Amino acid sequence: MADLFDRFAPLMAQRDALLGDGGINPFQVKMDELLSPTEAMIEGRRTILAGTNNYLGLTFSPEALKAAHDALEACGTGTTGSRVANGTYGSHKDLENALAEFFGKDHAMVFSTGFLANLGILSTLMGPEDYILMDADCHASIYDGVRGSAAQIIRFRHNDAADLEKRLARLEGKPGNKLIVIEGIYSMLGDKAPIAEIVAVKKKFSNVYLLSDEAHSLGVLGRYGRGLPEEAGVEDDVDFIVGTFSKSVGTVGGFCVSNHPQFDVLRLVCRAYVFTASLPPSVVVSATANLKLIKQGGALRARLMRNAEQLHQGLSGLGLKLGSDVSSVIAVVAPDPQTAIAFWRGLIEAGVYVNLALPPATPFGYSLLRASLCAAHTEAQIDQIIDIFADVALRLGMIERPASRRIAAG
Amino acid sequence: MSAPAEIVARLIPILGPFNKTNAPLSAATRFTEDLNFDSLIVMEFVAAVEDAFDISVPLNILPDVATVGELASAIDKILGEGKS
Ligand SMILES: Cc1ncc(COP(=O)(O)O)c(C=O)c1O
């Protein structure tokens, strides 16, 4: 009889072959000590963190720390219950009110993670007669969410409003509602959805709703940080916004906001809301505190974008292939997984942490060194990141010796 | 249910560029076992089929489609629904 785990053997063999005989395992990095939002001790080395999704650097904001300390003292370490049982405290309601106000929507629902928000909303919202039209590059939590839905799931080509239109046209005359699902900024390459075009397509048809996952764009885009819909001026046309507190908000948790008058019924039917414990109050008040900072965070966003420009310019100047235009996510495309792993190890050994992303989790089957910027990165840190990328890329033969740049010895 | 031969005949040339294992192509060809399709290839192949037939193939049906013939039957059904 085969062992339960035998079916993972090919995967393990592939993983072992990829990781080879030695070096740090990119998927088992341990942060031994956090020095700041942008630095940690890893393997005994002071390391610049350039892959944390901590876009605004708010993980140590004094406002959130103070609120969290107070909440810990007052309410303890956890709620030990579901939102619909003993797990809703005043702070959970306050956060939902703050979110609704922040987005200018009537309703907000807080989930325990962004993954659960997508799972809960997407598996519940649409019925058997309905259709979900999702961008092909959507996050795993969206794929898992729609898998639980009774609706027909149709994928359209990534960021291709014309392909979406074609698919909506094919559904014309069929009963049932349609939900378009996109992300504001796509997590792997950092490219934005063409949301104005998508809204224009949406408006050509009836009974079509739009949901945008603003995981990577909340706090990053828009004058007040409300994400891509704000930046593009289409907030009234986005029916549901899903998001997470685990990136620019600097803690953990997820949410969905909407103007739909019946929205609150989802509190009864979203299993991922009902059948899991609510967030600890210390986390909840951290999110509320940082949301306020995000709203006033114009200077942080400007800083983040300057940092993104600096890194993008530096890396593209080296001749490296990048996944998108200037963005808070900057992904270097490596020629193959082996090179990507060697690259990643070169970076970590020189004191830079970025994410390693390999197919099939990546678009186009790319092997990526995925960096995300932080408003708290200094110009000097980014210069150092660029120097270290140059050094490693040169050693791996991915670039010619850059004429203008000093190459670190090694 | 027997696979609609006409649709199978249209599928085979679309499948050509994705046939990295040089497997013989027929209604009985299995995507995973014979053609070594992974999720990325499935995505690209389905997109090519959708373009060729001017249809959307819902993700929901993919788990039940193991062979070219089963895909042809699924397409037949989608084409039929479009007319109703
Ligand atoms: C697009 C997108 N949606 C949802 C999530 C899940 O968020 P969380 O970390 O809160 O579960 C992520 C992050 O992992 C993401 O990138």
Image (cartoon, rainbow, N blue to C red):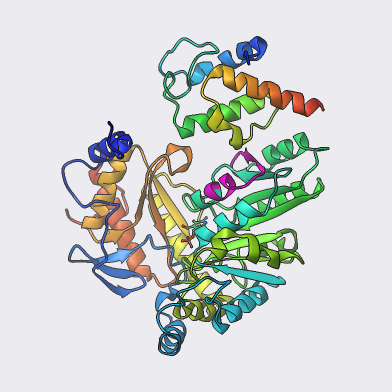
Can you give x and y, in whole percent of width and height, for residue A118 in the image?
56, 56
Q: Where in the figure is residue A258, as x and y percent of width and height? A: 69, 65
Q: Is residue B22 above or below residue A399?
A: above
Residue A117 position in % (x across, y down)? 56, 61
The region drawn magenta spans A143-158
Q: Establish if A38 lies above or below A135.
A: below
Q: Which quadrant is the N terminus of chain B positioned in?
A: top right
- Percent across and percent down for residue A402 are 31, 48
A373 or A356: nearer the eye?
A356
Look at 50% across and 58% down and name the residue there. Answer: A115
Query: Taking the image as drawn, is residue A215 in sight?
Result: no
- In percent of the image, x 66 and y 13: which residue is there? B4
Find residue A42 and report its image quarter.
bottom left
For the question of whether residue A44 can be seen, the reply is yes
Which is nearer the eye, A342 or A203?
A203
- Give whichever of B65, A14 is nearer the camera: B65
Q: Does the magenta portion include A268?
A: no
The image quarter in which residue A174 lies: top right
Relative to A234, is B39 on the left or the right?
left
**Does the magenta portion include A146?**
yes
Left or right, residue A184 beside residue A74? right
**Relative to B3, is A390 on the left or the right?**
left
Q: Quadrant of the C terminus of chain B?
A: top right
Pick out the residue farthest to the front. Answer: A1
